[in-house]
Image (spheres, helix red, strand yellow):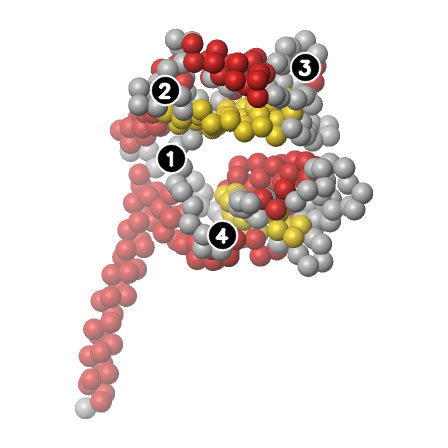
Amino acid sequence: QRECISIHVGQAGVQIGNACWELYCLEHGIQPDGQMPSDKTIGGGDDSFNTFFSETGAGKHVPRAVFVDLEPTVVDEVRTGTYRQLFHPEQLITGKEDAANNYARGHYTIGKEIVDLVLDRIRKLTNLVPYPRIHFPLATYAPVISAEKAYHEQLSVAEITNACFEPANQMVKCDPRHGKYMACCMLYRGDVVPKDVNAAIATIKTKRTIQFVDWCPTGFKVGINYQPPTVVPGGDLAKVQRAVCMLSNTTAIAEAWARLDHKFDLMYAKRAFVHCVLSHFLSVHLASCRGKCMLPQGFFLFKVHSL
């Protein structure tokens, strides 16, 4: 059985990770203190939790996750929150101050102070097991629907499958109709049968707006989990009978990189924030050069005194 680790970096990563682990605990019937009641019904009584959790000898389930931030404010919310007893304290890593949106400050000075500690914790979690690299996957989820609209929507297997190929349901802003798919991995949950999935995918292949590369015309990989999706109590999403998450490799992702490249060109044309980067970059290298220049002087003084 495969084991997955999660690395949550920065304010957005830590806050999203905190919400995700709350959902994982609800799905597997794990309490906020990491214990799993003996009479639990959620999760089916199997050991599927081992993918995301490690179980200690005392029966506590610890997330395979690392939280990292340069300043402690956001991670402190995890340390003092409802699930504070769930996480291993050594996997909540923080510095003392943030980089103030300055790349050079985060890369050369502040971030460099904790990178070794972070890599050490990640190595312990991965246990030095090699993993294949995934380049720029496009994640899509359907249905994303509120409780008020759930009663008025048709959420069949065909509907949620078609929704995965709509730009509105993607986690990256790009139009897949402007590119070609190389591979798709669709993971269904809930009341789903293979017959409906095969029919929905066959319909997708007939649409002209959804194109695949010539050398991989049938690049679909499908997985089905018959346990329905779980929602956080009091959340905005409706509890549905079935859902699908799609990871795809498409050339349309180039739109996102082109957009980012264009924004950089606009800022660099005005030399925005360049002085911040240069000041930190020069200060770091000047300090390094100063240290190298002082080294021969030390040898010279030692030689004079020895005489």
Pair 1/2: label in front: 2
Secondary structure under badge 3? Answer: helix
Mark 1 → mark 4, Cα distance in angstroms: 19 Å
Amino acid, disc 3: Ala
Mark 2 → mark 3, Cα distance in angstroms: 34 Å
Quadrant in the picture for the C terminus:
bottom left
Amino acid, disc 1: His
Mark 1 → mark 2, Cα distance in angstroms: 20 Å
Secondary structure under badge 2? Answer: loop
* Residue 100 visible, this angle: yes
Q: Do labels 3 and 4 touch, CB within 8 Å?
A: no
Instruction: Check disc 4 and report the residue beneath it.
Output: 126
Residue 241 falls left or right of residue 201: right
Pair 3/4: label in front: 4
* Residue 259 visible, this angle: no
Residue name at image x 52 percent, y 53 percent: 125
- At label 2, counting other C-alpha atoms closer than 10 Å, the crowd grade (few under 14, some 14-19, many 20 or more) is few
Instruction: Check disc 3 and report the residue beneath it.
Output: 150
Instruction: Check disc 2 and report the residue beneath it.
Output: 217
Pair 4/2: label in front: 2
Residue 222 falls left or right of residue 86: left
Q: Which of the two residues, 114 or 104, is positioned nearer the viewer here?
A: 114
Mark 3 → mark 4, Cα distance in angstroms: 40 Å
Amino acid, disc 2: Pro
Mark 4 → mark 2, Cα distance in angstroms: 35 Å
Mark with earlier residue (3, 4): 4
Mark with earlier residue (2, 3): 3
Instruction: Check disc 1 and report the residue beneath it.
Output: 135
